Image (cartoon, grey):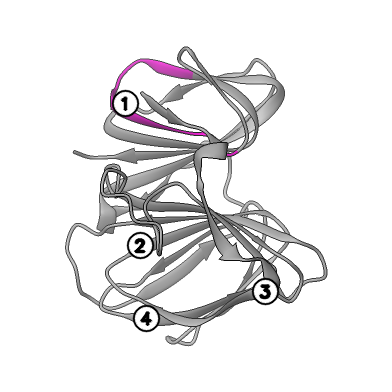
Amino acid sequence: MDVRRAGERYRGGDAAAGIESLHAFSFGPHYDPDNLRFGAVIACNEERLAPGAGFDEHPHSHTEIVTWVVEGELTHRDSTGHRSVVRPGDVQRLSAAGGVRHVERNDGDVRLVFVQMWLAPVQPGGDPCYEVVHGIADSTPYAVPEAGAMLHVRRLAPGERTAVPDGAFVYAHLVRGGVRLGEQELGPGDSARITDAKDLEAVGARTGAELLLWEMAG
C-alpha cells in the first residue's frame, strides 16, 4: 500500500479565475515520470470552483472521465449535445473515445467542489458517450468496462467496517471524514494505491467517512 497525502498533491488551477486544482498524478505543466498512472487511473483531480468560474470548452480523447461532486452543482455541456447539472451523490461519466469537447462550470451561487478521475481505456477510439447516475446508492458498484474498472462508493458511519475489493489494483480516495485502511489512517484528500489487495478492511473514524474505491484488473 502506497499512501499519498493531500498535502503532497501538485497545486494547479488559476486563482484569478476562481479555480483551484489539486492533482494526485503527473498533470499539465507538472511532469513526473514516476507518477504517470496506477492501474487504469491516470488522473485524480480535486477541483474547487468559485461561483461563475469554470473550464471553457476543451477537447478530450481516449479517456474515461468520471466525476464525483462533493458540494455545489456542476453544469456540464458537450459537443454531442448533452447538457446536465450534476449534484452530490451523482456519478457522471464522459467517455471521450475518439474525441469530444466539453464545458464544465459552476453556474450556482456557492462554491463547487468535485473530484474528477481519468482512466485509460483498454482500447482507444470508438464513439463518445455520456451518462449520469443520480443518487447512486451506497455499495452499488459502477462499472467502467472500457477501462476494466469498477467504482465502489462507501459511506461509513463511525466504526463501521467495509471490505476493500480484492484486486490486482485498488485506488482509494477519501472524500471526507477519516478512515483506517489496513494499518493506515487516512484524512480528507488522502489516497492509497494498493497492489494485489486481499482481505483488507476500511473502518470509518469517529467522524465517519466518504470513500471512493477503484477496483481494477491487472
Q: Which residue is mark 3?
A: 17
Q: Quadrant of the C terminus?
A: top left
Q: Which residue is mark 1?
A: 166
The kind of residue on which mark 3 rests is Ala
Rounded to the nearest whole Å, what is the CA distance between mark 3 and mark 4?
A: 24 Å
Identify whether 164 is placed above or below 108.
Answer: above
Task: Return the x and y of residue 186 as percentages of the image width and height.
Answer: 56, 26
Q: Earlier in the sequence, mark 2 or mark 3?
A: 3
Q: Report the residue at 36% width, 45% height from top.
A: 150
Pick the front one: 59 or 86: 59
Q: Is 123 on the left or on the right of 48, as rendered?
A: left
Rounded to the nearest whole Å, what is the CA distance between mark 4 and mark 2?
A: 11 Å
Query: Magenta residues, as a range?
Result: 189-201
Q: Which residue is mark 2?
A: 64
Q: Is residue 199 magenta?
A: yes
Rounded to the nearest whole Å, what is the CA distance between mark 1 and mark 4?
A: 34 Å
Q: Quadrant of the N terminus?
A: top left
Mark 3 touches mark 1? (CB < 8 Å): no
Q: Secondary structure at mark 4?
A: strand
How many neighbours does mark 2 have within 10 angstroms: few (below 14), some (14-19), or many (20 or more)? many
How many neighbours does mark 3 have within 10 angstroms: few (below 14), some (14-19), or many (20 or more)? few
Identify whether 194 is placed above or below 74.
Answer: above
Most extreme residue toward the right is: 109
How many neighbours does mark 1 have within 10 angstroms: few (below 14), some (14-19), or many (20 or more)? some
